[in-house]
Amino acid sequence: MVALPTPVRGIAALMALLSAAVACREPDGGRGLVIVGRSPIVSLDPVTNDDYYAQNLFRNVFDSLVALDDTLRVVPALATSWSSPSDHVWRFELRRGVSFHDGRTLAAGDVKATLDRARASPQSWLAAHFALVSDVRAPSPYLVEIETRVPVPLLLRRLSDVMVLPAGEITGELPVGSGPYRLRSFVAGKEAVLEGFDASWRGRPHWDRAVFRSEPDGAARVERLLRREADLIEAPPLEAAPRIRASAAARLVEREGVQVALLGLDAQARPGNPFGRFEARRAVALSLDRAALVREALGGGGTAASQLAVPGVVGYVPDLAPAPRDIGAARAALAAAGFPRGFDSPLLFSERDRRLAEGVARQAAEAGVAFRLQELPWHVLDARLRARSSPAHVYFATFPSGDAAELLMDLHTPTSDASFGAYNFSGFSDRLLDDLLERADLAMDPRVRIRLLERAQRRATEAHALIPLVVPAQRFAVRRDIAWSGNGLGRIDLQAVREGPLLH
């Protein structure tokens, strides 16, 4: 309800006030929603753009064969059922009567074409996930078969990341999907406008319009919300939390996180690289007070990370506690590494991770490791990581498939076919860890696989090439008249965002 001043002079003034109050939810007439995220959406291609905010948009426009629900359980999407007649073959029965936004009807050939491109495109962020797929077939209009060279127990979960487009659609300016919203306009880096698609198999869209805008400055995002120029914003800054809580116009939405913040170190044994020595990496790990990072960098909104996974993810080890801080042991480790007086190193990070990087640098300095902070735009940092030219960096990892192997594989020795270690930015290599991960990747028995992943989890955590820092809470802010409480994956499902009071 809009609070009106007294007195309101005339119908014209009343109408103007009401119009202003709902302006942000009516970008083009009808019921509309404005969302403001922190990273720019530079591409609408779901095969080449893995940015988390962009993926939130994609999941409202496109559909995958299967999806993950709020508890990370695999559920039907474009596939209504599936089976595995052998360890190397998966069969998917497609949903009938699914319409794409341009009127075409979903068929098996569309799924095959999408998967073939996801596997083959040089720019595909999905290619490494499907490197062990040997063939994708469409034997009938509503049957898809996927054959792998070896058993791939993670295949089903990884398919939840593949957004299906019509065959021949190479994502032009406004690519076509089958979700409840279709793309109406796009200005790269600024905004994408969606409109409801009434023929969606997921049901009639609640909103007539939805606008995804980008604003990297956290304070500016909050101002947009409080000025009623936005309905939902991503990642409000910690310092803005008291103001939002005291506001009559907005409220915070916080959930347990599904991301882990990491300190990545260059573990390659080469001249001039101190982190190529295990004891130097161990010294950094021993210097960290993760509980203090939660308080100071996250404002208390999160938990200390103990490993390269988060609770609820397959392969999480419940009894693996965060390592305590021990400055004396850290200095002894530095001396054992050959640096009794310590050393200095650049520490790379993007704008959103400044507080965390500052906290890490401050703590490590007490042990003798002097990190020089270097803030980079995310796309520049990403390029440095992929080129393996970062001595140390802070970044976040997610678990879109709900499986710890998503991150553990980043420590596998890279293979020539990119089936393992495609995102090993640290250059770390350990034969025992490789063996555990390869055996887990082939284990079709879930109990065997979990045991292997837990062993791999312990060994990877002890290597200190990727040092777990914190698990931040998911934080959004919304208008008070928007009934939305987030979800377990941190996604913005427009079908779940409604007007009205939040019911508990």
Image (cartoon, helix red, strand yellow):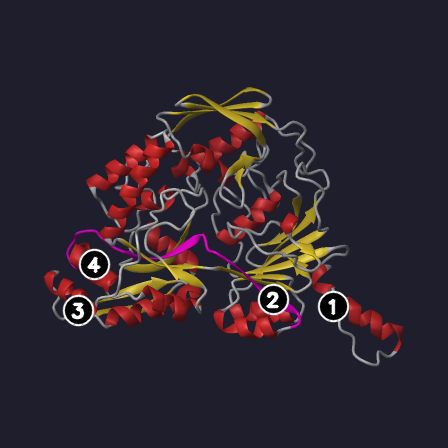
Residue 255 lies in magenta, yes or no? yes
Q: Which residue is mark 4?
A: 282
Circle 1: residue type: Ala
Q: Which mark is residue 21?
A: 1
Circle 3: residue type: Gly
Circle 2: residue type: Arg
- Mark 2 vs 4, N-terminal side: 2
In the figure, is residue 438 to the left or right of 176? left
Given residues 343 and 175, the one toward you in this image is 343
- Mark 3 vs 2, N-terminal side: 2
Question: What is the distance, in whole Å, between disc 1 and disc 4 at their CAs?
Answer: 55 Å
Rendering coords of residue 84 (x, y %): 46, 23
- Mark 1 vs 2, N-terminal side: 1
Secondary structure beneath dot 2 equals: strand
Q: Nearer the viewer, mark 1 or mark 3?
A: 3
Q: Which residue is mark 2?
A: 251
Taking the spot 24% from the left edge, 48% from the top edge, the residue there is 428
- Mark 3 vs 4, N-terminal side: 4
Rendering coords of residue 194 (x, y %): 66, 50
- Mark 1 vs 3, N-terminal side: 1
The answer to the question of whether label 1 and label 3 lie on touching residues, with beta carbons closer than 8 A, is: no
Query: In the rendered structure, which segment of residues is drawn in magenta?
Result: 248-272
The answer to the question of whether label 2 and label 4 lie on touching residues, with beta carbons closer than 8 A, is: no
Secondary structure beneath dot 1 equals: helix
